[in-house]
Image: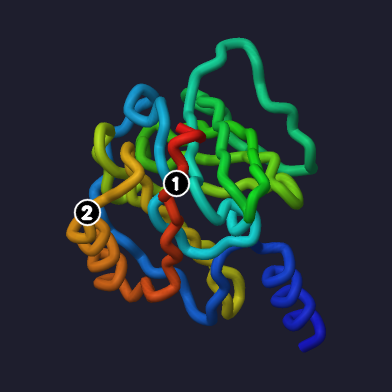
Amino acid sequence: MEKLVFVSLSFLTLSSGRINFGKCPKIDLAPLDMNKRDLEGRWYEIERMPNQEEDTLERCAFMDFYSEEGKMVKQKANVDLGISANYRLKILKSGLHGKHNHTFYGEIWQPYIQEPSVLAVFETGYYNPFHFRYNFYLFHKEKFAFIYNCISKLRFKREFAWIWSRERTLSSDTIGAFKKMLASYGVDTNSFKTIDQTNCLARA
């Protein structure tokens, strides 16, 4: 019993995603055909499930993905990056917390050729470096990206989800379609947080 409690509390303490009891849903969708060029450029964060690291990006959050040959982000923690990458992109992620600007740096790569829509991510983070995955379920390289990931351990699951757009706004119908898809697999979508993208022109 003591071991179970210790492991469970460690999972809760060290994780940064949304924590719930239960198992992760099995989302059975055909893999998306994605490549490096599809993701490059700027994406604005429209909504996300709360997570500890990115909660410091309250407003005007955006991500820039870009190539930088020959240079790698230094690993600042004992994180097993695991598998060799098919390609790598740099990440610059930025947003406002109150009046203060917070910026993270990192890398994203494609660990499995047979799963082009699953991308691994390593970021420096605001509190600590962290390592997770983006599972892209709906994607249009010129319009939107919908991402969900879930990690389960013992009786708990840790969920991450993001809604990105190439513009600072995205139609409610498009957002609703993604949430409806997640809900059909048993995902509770009520915790999504809307990111304020107003009065951000100076940061474009």
Which quarter of the picture shows residue 9?
A: bottom right
Mark 1 or mark 2: name the one nearer the start of the chain: 2
- Return the residue nearer the eye: 199 or 176: 199
Farthest left residue in view:
173
Q: In what quadrant of the picture does the N terminus appear?
A: bottom right
Percent coordinates x, y for residue 69 in the rendering? 56, 11
Q: Position of residue 189 (x, y in %)?
A: 37, 71
Left/right placement of residue 96 relative to residue 111 reads: right
Disc 1 marks a residue whose amino acid type is Asn
Image vertical order of residue 182 relative to residue 147, above or below: below
Q: Which amino acid, mark 2?
A: Ser
x 57%, y 32%: residue: 92
* Residue ID at (79%, 41%): 77
Q: Is residue 4 left or right of residue 93?
A: right
Label 2 secondary element: loop
Residue nearer the viewer, 175 or 6: 175
Residue 41, by quadrant, is top left
Dot 1 crowding, Cα within 10 Å, few <14, some 14–19, many 20+: few
Residue lying at 66% horizontally and 63% vertically, measured from the top left:
15
Please determine whether, in this image, residue 154 is positioned above or below residue 53: below
Label 1 vs label 2, nearer the camera: 1
Q: What residue is at 59 percent from the left and 53 percent from the top?
A: 54
- Looking at the rendering, which quadrant does residue 140 occupy? top left
The one of 40 and 1 positioned closer to us in this rendering: 40
- Determine which of the numbered discs, if any, sits on residue 95 in the image: none
Q: Are marks 1 and 2 in contact (CB under 8 Å)?
A: no
Q: Which residue is mark 2?
A: 171
Viewport quadrant of the C terminus: top left
Around disc 2, counting alpha carbons within 10 Å, would you say few (fewer than 14), some (14 to 19), or many (20 or more)? few
Q: Position of residue 168 (x, y in %)?
A: 35, 44
Q: Most extreme residue toward the bottom, as rendered? A: 1
To which residue does mark 1 refer? Answer: 199
